[in-house]
Image (cartoon, rainbow, N blue to C red):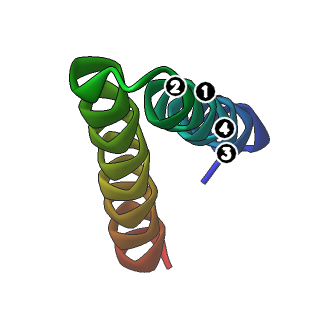
Amino acid sequence: MSGEDKLKNKIEDLGGRAKEAVGKVTGDADTKNEGRADQANSSLKDAGEKVKDAFKK
């Protein structure tokens, strides 16, 4: 996994955590759920990159 991909995934994860927190504080379920979805998407991308790296070896 390239450093750039790791950074993008981390930023997406942190953004998702922030959205989720804002949603909790404001009581906005949609924003909270968007944040959770962003985090899940980031985790899936990380897993996919790890699989790619495993096959490159």
Q: Which mark is residue 15?
A: 1
Q: Are marks 1 and 2 in contact (CB under 8 Å)?
A: yes
Work out whether residue 23 or residue 50 is closer to the camera in this orientation and state it. Answer: 23
Q: Badge 3: how crowded within 10 Å, few (<14), some, or many (20+)?
A: some
Residue on which disc 4 sits: 14
Work out whether residue 25 or residue 10 is closer to the camera in this orientation and state it. Answer: 25
Q: Badge 4: how crowded within 10 Å, few (<14), some, or many (20+)?
A: some
Please provide percent x and percent y for residue 19. Answer: 52, 25
Q: Could you tell me which residue is drawn at 38 percent across and 26 percent down?
A: 27
Foreground mark, 3 or 1?
1
Work out whether residue 20 or residue 38 is closer to the camera in this orientation and state it. Answer: 20
Q: Describe residue 44's horizontal placement relative to residue 18 as left or right.
A: left
Earlier sequence position, callout 4 versus callout 3: 3
> Where is residue 18, by image quadrant?
top right
Cα–Cα gap, marks 4 and 3: 12 Å
| SS at badge 3 | helix
Earlier sequence position, callout 2 versus callout 4: 4
Foreground mark, 2 or 4?
2
Q: Which mark is residue 19?
A: 2
Q: Which mark is residue 6?
A: 3
Cα–Cα gap, marks 1 and 4: 4 Å
Q: Are marks 2 and 3 in contact (CB under 8 Å)?
A: no
54 versus 7 height, above or below: below
Q: Could you tell me which residue is drawn at 67 percent across and 45 percent down?
A: 6
Foreground mark, 4 or 3?
4
Q: Are marks 1 and 4 in contact (CB under 8 Å)?
A: yes
